Image: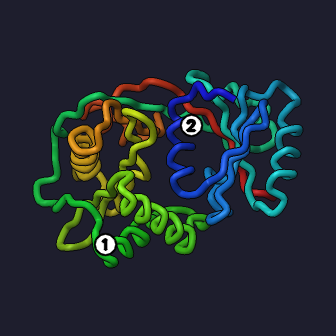
Amino acid sequence: MHLRSLGYRTDLALLQLDGSVVEDRGTHLVVRTPANPTFHWGNYLLLAHPPEPGQADHWVKTFEREFPDALHRAFGVDGAEGSVGDLAAFAELGYETDASSVMTARAVSPPARPHPTAEVRPLVSDDDWAQQVELAVEGEDEHYSVEFATRRGEAHRRNVGNGHGQWFGAFLDQRLVASMGIFTSADGLARYQEVKTHPGFRGQGLAGTLVHAAGRHALDEMGAETLVMVADPDYLAIRVYRSVGFDDTETQLGASRVRA
């Protein structure tokens, strides 16, 4: 199956760095992350096309055959355009549907309001990475457990150690209050990962400061030509990304739910 979606193409490249397996079934891809089976977007089906009316049940049964022990159901749809309306067949079954913005930039500008005192640097020590786990679970729902965040953090640290990219943090008085990763995902492409600011420190310019620093590192040190990130088009942070040079390039579609 030839992928048209820049968002899913970079997603899969980074998942495979983590040890995920991608199996091509022709009409869809099966994405598995054996080391983290509760990771919804590491264990899902990526469909070549949106389901037609009445077809969602077929895909749910296909998912259940592939992941019989999973407590979730998750489906991506390949393509560069679309809307949540294309996922109506899943919505009718009670699935949460999402149309995210795939954003790209070939250069980044400093934010209009950078944080004046934050120390921005790569995560290095055991304490840095322990704080990353704590930050990851702040403000998330119950499925984003410490165990899950620890597995993700271990994978990110391993990829940094193997030279695939870098994980940046913003520290205030030695406390990690915002972070994000950026990794090489294909020739000339670098993909942002898990942009996160602690709920108590939002609106202070930390995200823009980090996005700019990580982007400059990717362009200057990693050989990247195009930076890629996926963002919620309805969340305020997307304005920050646009302000430092990102444009909305594609739409990425997905549907998911926790098993009843």
Give how far across and how far down residue 152 sits, in percent: 50, 64
Which of the image's four quarters has the C terminus? bottom right
Mark 2 lies on residue: 8
**Residue type, mark 1 in image:** Asp
Give how far across and how far down residue 158 sits, in percent: 43, 64
Occupied quadrant, residue 85: top right
Secondary structure beneath label 2: helix
Give how far across and how far down residue 111 sits, in percent: 19, 39
Q: Which residue is at a point 34% across and 31% down the rendered structure image? A: 226
**Residue type, mark 2 in image:** Tyr
Q: Which residue is at a point 78% across and 30% down the rendered structure image? A: 27
Q: Which residue lies furthest to the bottom in this view?
A: 127
Horizontal side of residue 4 vs 255, given as left or right = left
Q: How many marks?
A: 2
Q: Assess disc 1: are there few (<14), some (14-19) or many (≥20) residues with their C-alpha within 10 Å of its C-alpha.
A: some
Q: Observer-nearest residue: 45 or 143?
A: 45
Occupied quadrant, residue 231: top left
Mark 1 lies on residue: 128
Query: Is 29 rendered above or below residue 138?
Result: above
Question: Rounded to the nearest whole Å, what is the CA distance between mark 1 and mark 2?
Answer: 29 Å
Secondary structure beneath label 1: helix
Residue 120 seen by the camera: yes
Query: Is 146 rendered above or below residue 123?
Result: below
Q: Which residue is at a point 56% across and 32% down the rendered structure image? A: 252
Q: Which residue lies furthest to the left in this view?
A: 116
